[in-house]
Amino acid sequence: MIGTSLCRWAISYCAVAIAWLLLAEGLMVAGFGFPNHDIGGPDTLVIVHMVCVGWLSMALCGALFQFVPVLVARPLYAERWTLPALALLTLGLTVLLAGFLALGGHFNGPAWLLPVGAVLLIAGFALVVVNLSMTLWSARPLPGPARFVAGGLACICVTTAFGGMFSLVLSGTAAGAQWPDLLISGVPIHAIAGLGGWLTFTAMGVSYRLLAMFMLAPDGDVRLGRLAWLAGITALAVGLVGGVLTFWRMTGLNLALLLAGPAALLSLAAYGRDVLGLYRTRKRRALELNTRMSLAALVSLAAAAILGAALLAIGFFQSHVGALAFLVAFGWLTGLVLANLYKIVPFLTWLETYGPVMGRMPTPRVQDLVAERRALKWFVVFFAGSWAATLMLLLDAALGFRVAVAAVMLATLGLSEEFIRARRLADVAEPLRLPTGAAMPHLLVSRN
Amino acid sequence: MTIDDDDLVARIRQALKVVIDPELGHNIVDLGFIYDVSVDDGVVHIIMTATTLGCPAAFFLKEGVASSACLVPGVESVDVTMTFEPPWQPSMISPGVRSSLGFAEVN
């Protein structure tokens, strides 16, 4: 197989994801949820699930449908499943959020909203996991980056399983009443599997390949990423399996997490070393904006690892876990996803528009679809806002947090406009913009 | 190959310069993607590569090479083979293009 085809709905996933991100940011600016309300309260759960499921997971799913086939040089197992999965995830999240709003007393909703929302989300993620797993299965033995994705897929199964059980407890069902302590013991497992396993571990794996491709750095050494993968898988296995076992016995969760912590730090350190190695050995000296901003996101990941270890050491972890979670979700993951969307959107748009006429007419470059200098200021505002918002949370300055998130939202709006301009070919100079035979791409769906 | 075939190969190589790698932004001939062009009784055989196995652009590059070669007068048919052996290296880029891309010195 020489090349994979375009995933028709990858752009749609990205568009839906950005809409959820903007909505979550708007609510935070308005003072909804943490830090104005309890970190474990229903309003905060609305924000957390908008960001983690609506934004990060949707964007990651769209990117994986396009790039897992590139990682393993095999076609996607079932392209036709991608749209039903998008519909199930969107509907499931909407119902789940309605359930949280009802739980918070914002309206008088039925108790079944949470479990029904969870079931729809589980169905959507099941379609994603089976589709990507079968694609990976066809390419055994897996190359290094794909192993991270396989680990991430296992973790989203754990995350959704716990989420489903939480929905039964929170909605007051008879089944949920059998696990009265689930919310106390299970939330760390749910969060670690989701943020650490599914989102971070998967993003690490994909970034190995993407950074090597964009920097033209040699990544053929089979040892590349091995330590980061082994230590990460060990950390996740000890944290999740140990967490589940201790949950069963209701003791020792902290021991499992303490054992997993050093392995997780080793994985992140090895990952940082590998990325620095790729950076040093790159053939392409002048890096494009997406790569530079990906490196800025990695700085956030390093900062999060240091902050987490420091908070644990001084005994402030529990009281400041919100700041750490925000830094991971925005400074690291959102920054990395936005940086990569800045390449993915114009690249897919280029392939869709100019690929079919290549060889017959002169075509522009991918870089001609974007204006890096204009976008740079939005990335600067985004990262400055994310880091400032983290600091405000550490200082318990709720108003300062809202102002900082307003800056993050402004940057997100600015970058959204850049993505739309790329889809509209607005920055491509004539006469290359629409050569004979090329068709203007649709905004929200690709022709494949 | 005859002198006429050599001339045809030269014209085909020139025609292939309309095909660019969208990511690197230069034509695939100067980037070193074209491993071989030969002519056999009017049938053109082209062996080419791309930067990444499995990349969605690889299919369009192959089609683009076939389309541009077909437009050259004297070409009856075109057979394009995409290979990743040997894998493409930045050292295959022509020196002028390499410096304009801001590439490090490669051996």
Image (cartoon, coloured by chain):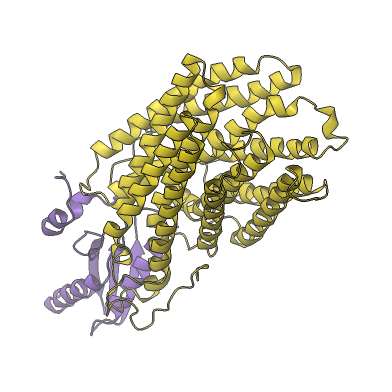
Location of residue A182 by image quarter: top right
Location of residue A250 by image quarter: top right
Q: At which x and y percent is residue B33?
A: 26, 60
Query: Is residue A141 visible in this depiction of the protein?
Result: no
Q: Is residue A401 above or below residue B94?
A: above
Front residue (pair B8, A25): A25
Q: At which x and y percent is residue A386?
A: 42, 41
Number of on-image labels: 0
Front residue (pair A27, B44): A27
Q: Is residue A406 above or below residue A418?
A: above
Is B94 on the left or on the right of A249, as rendered? left
Task: State the hue of chain A.
Answer: yellow
Front residue (pair A447, B45): A447
The residue under the point 58% across, 20% down is A257
Residue positioned most to the front = A399
Residue positioned most to the right = A174
Is B17 on the left or on the right of A9, as rendered? left
The residue under the point 50% across, 68% down is A446
Query: Is residue B81 visible in this depiction of the protein?
Result: yes
Quadrant in which the N terminus of chain A is drawn: bottom left
The residue under the point 85% across, 31% down is A177
Q: Is residue A107 above or below residue A319?
A: below
Q: At which x and y percent is residue A197?
A: 55, 35
Q: At which x and y percent is residue A439?
A: 42, 79
Front residue (pair A101, B9): A101
Task: State the hue of chain B.
Answer: purple
Location of residue A304 by image quarter: top left
Is A235 on the left or on the right of A292, as rendered? right
